[in-house]
Image: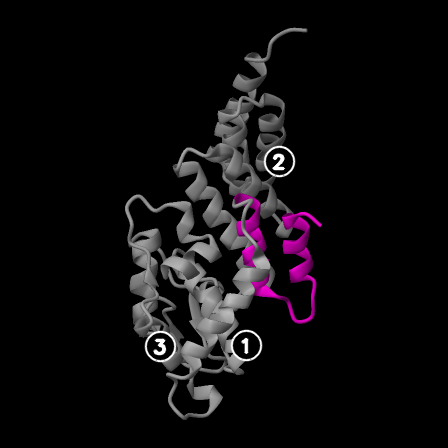
């Protein structure tokens, strides 16, 4: 199987192999990568984390696990501009720097192997973690506890002061949703790095992993425009138009489609 098929097959397992799926995503972009070696080496990190955890019941080990990762120098990547390596799991493991979601995927895999209850939360702009039933969330970058007020402040930073905290922001993310979000992160990072072919791989994977949104089709349309593929761009613009429920955006998309049609050469 090619890396994309391996990635999807990992998510179809019971339980899903979340970290392995993310490693196969990296294999799409790093041809020399050996996923089996990355997964084998992960055992060393598991041992280093486990030996530094306190003697507590598993249900109380989520925050110590995250703090232990901090002690081992795992931190949020603050590089400017942020590069794709902040979301490619083998490079995050090697550099010990990554986006919140990337660090969360590592923590979730460790939690599974150590039988520590922990789930992902698809919070806007900054992926979070939670112990099921707890009254707080956890920042995967530091292990800090986040309560309602903290979540509101985090939301304001991500979406602006007019944003309102909603129950959907605190919903548990499924493995497929997490890998789709990872793919969106990589798509954006590859676009910003001027790597449209790499971004196209991520954009296609986003559409494969779950119901796409309007912005997913728009993002791929923008990539096709850079690659000078007008027919493919039109396909995504038409699908974005069908998913659009904002009148102003609907008008903008319709105008863009008309301009694209006018630009087509006659045959």
Front of the two marks 2 and 1: 1
Can you identify the residue that label 1 sits on? 112
Q: Give SS at disc 1.
A: helix
Magenta stretch encompasses residue 153: no
Q: Is residue 16 magenta?
A: yes
| Mark 3 vs mark 2, CA separation in Å | 45 Å
Q: Which mark is residue 239?
A: 2
Q: Check disc 2 and report its element: helix, strand or loop.
A: helix
Question: CB of mark 2 within 8 Å of CB of mark 1?
Answer: no
Looking at the image, which residue is at 37% across and 83% down? 52
Q: Is residue 265 left or right of residue 56?
A: right
- Residue 97 numbered mark, or none: none
Return the x and y of residue 146 as percentages of the image width and height.
33, 73
64 above or below 20? Answer: below
Quarter of image, res 78 = bottom left
* Badge 2 or badge 1: first in the primary sequence: 1
Which numbered disc, 1 or 3, marks the residue that appears first in the sequence? Answer: 3
Q: Which residue is mark 3?
A: 68
Q: Residues within 10 Å of mark 3 (few under 14, many from 20)?
A: many
Q: Quadrant of residue 74?
A: bottom left
Q: Residue at x 69, y 70 (%)?
A: 14
Provide the secondary structure element on which disc 3 rests: helix
Q: Which residues are magenta?
A: 1-29
Return the residue nearer the eye: 170 or 62: 62
Image check: 12 left or right of 65? right
Instruction: Identify which residue is drawn at 36% across, 62% down.
Output: 96
Do the residues under discs 3 and 2 have CB atoms within 8 angstroms? no
């Amino acid at each position: 199987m090619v890396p994309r098929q391996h990635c999807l097959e990992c998510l179809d397992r019971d339980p899903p192999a979340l970290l392995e799926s993310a490693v196969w995503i990296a294999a799409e972009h790093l041809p020399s990568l050996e996923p089996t070696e990355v997964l084998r080496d992960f055992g060393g990190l598991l041992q280093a984390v486990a030996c530094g955890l306190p003697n507590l019941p598993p249900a109380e080990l989520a925050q110590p696990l995250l703090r232990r990762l901090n002690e081992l120098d795992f931190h949020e990547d603050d590089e400017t501009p942020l590069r794709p390596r902040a979301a490619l799991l083998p490079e995050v493991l090697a550099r010990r720097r990554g986006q919140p979601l990337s660090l969360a995927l590592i923590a979730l895999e460790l939690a599974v192997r150590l039988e520590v209850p922990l789930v992902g939360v698809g919070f806007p702009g900054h992926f979070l973690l939670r112990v099921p039933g707890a009254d707080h969330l956890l920042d995967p970058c530091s292990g800090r506890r986040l309560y309602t007020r903290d979540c509101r402040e985090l939301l304001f930073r991500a979406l602006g002061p007019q944003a309102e905290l909603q129950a959907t922001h605190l919903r548990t993310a499924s493995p497929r949703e997490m890998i789709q979000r990872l793919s969106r992160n990589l798509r954006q990072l590859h676009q910003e790095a001027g790597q449209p072919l790499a971004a196209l791989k991520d954009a296609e994977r986003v559409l494969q992993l779950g119901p796409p949104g309007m912005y997913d089709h728009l993002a791929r349309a923008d990539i096709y425009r850079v690659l000078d593929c007008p027919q493919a761009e039109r396909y995504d613009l038409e699908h974005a138009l069908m998913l659009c429920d904002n009148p102003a955006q609907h008008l903008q998309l319709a105008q863009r489609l008309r301009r694209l049609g006018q630009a087509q050469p006659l045959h």
